[in-house]
Amino acid sequence: MHKIAVTGGTGFIGSVLISTLVEQGGSARLLSRASSAAQLAPAIDVVTGDLDDPAALSALVRGMDCVIHLAGYAHATSKPIPAEIERHRRINLEGTQNLFLYAATAGVRRFVFVSSVKAGGEDARACLNEHSARLPVDPYGLIKRETEDWLFEEGARTGVEISVLRPALVYGPGVKGNLSAMLRAIDHQRFPPVAETHNIRSMVSVQDVVAALLAAAARSEAAGQVCILEDGEAYSTRRIYTAMATALGRPIPAWSLPASVLRGLGRVGDLGENVLRRSLPFNSTFATRLLDSACYRSVCADAALGFKPQQRLEDVLPAMVRAYRESM
């Protein structure tokens, strides 16, 4: 596949994808709302617009072999409000539908959709794979799953090959969200040392995700597949904490907070939110993320994508810390 259209190319994963394409001597056409994207390498053709812009979508997919769809709305709170749910639906479902229909009309042969492990459900104790019979538990996962199902139905109708990738938590230089917040909190000694609970939080490096995306665009085995992306490691919260503190050059305290204390603090946070009617930095949802497992294992990524993870968190953390320091 030589002609690739990309959405979300200025985001965390997308920017690495675009850089990799340029380094490998490839070219791409990028849909971007940001005029700054025009400063990218000459090999990148930038179309300015959004997922609800017919002219931009038509220009994006014209003459393309494959679409890699990364753009989406990933923000989620512990108590989703109707406006946020509507935003998920408008951007993640309806935006994808708009893009796909233009792609199918233009004769695009392969559509790679970047979903989430949340589309396959969650389990605080067991490791899930692509065939686990679980339903999503939050609006983000539900809408991602609905989008996947719609794409496979429409792909069968139009003859477009669909490939769905479900990355676990992605790490790498420039990462945002919870990992960035945890790194910053440990650096400022505002993150208490968590006791070892042997929970498992599956993760994957951004470079390995990009390798999987390019494989999904090119390999015939990827057509019709849903593949989880994870690096095969078993990251407990304690392991993540220790690795981050070490990379930051921060001492690791000899003491740690027991899980029971953290869960108790989470319940106190819930009560405070009910009284104050606003979100607090620590509640039971945050405690659950720290202490419970979110374990995923792929049974198809190797065969469908030739996916063999090359990195683990400890390998990448020095570069993550450098990027964090440079952003301060």
Image: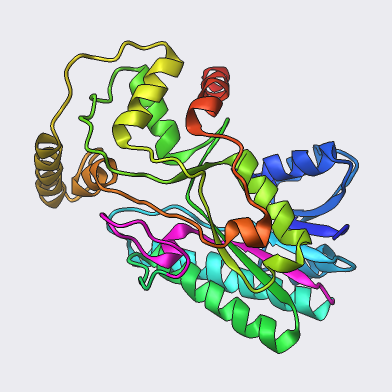
The prevailing secondary structure element of the residues shown in magenta is loop
Residue 318 x %, y %? 54, 20
The residue shown at (38%, 38%) is 235
Q: Say above or below: 6 vs 246.
A: below
The residue shown at (70%, 60%) is 216
Image quadrant in which you'd find residue 173: top right
111 in the magenta segment: yes
Q: Say above or below: 279 vs 258.
A: below
Q: Which residues are magenta?
A: 107-131
What's the colour scheme?
rainbow
* 278 displayed left or right of 3: left
Residue 278 x %, y %? 22, 48
- Does residue 79 show up? yes
Q: Say above or below: 71 vs 23.
A: below
The residue shown at (69%, 89%) is 157
122 and 233: which is toward the camera: 233
Residue ranking furthest to the bottom: 157
142 in the magenta segment: no
The residue shown at (37%, 31%) is 240
- Does residue 71 show up? no
Image quadrant in which you'd find residue 101: bottom right
Residue 78 x %, y %? 28, 54
* 181 displayed left or right of 313: left
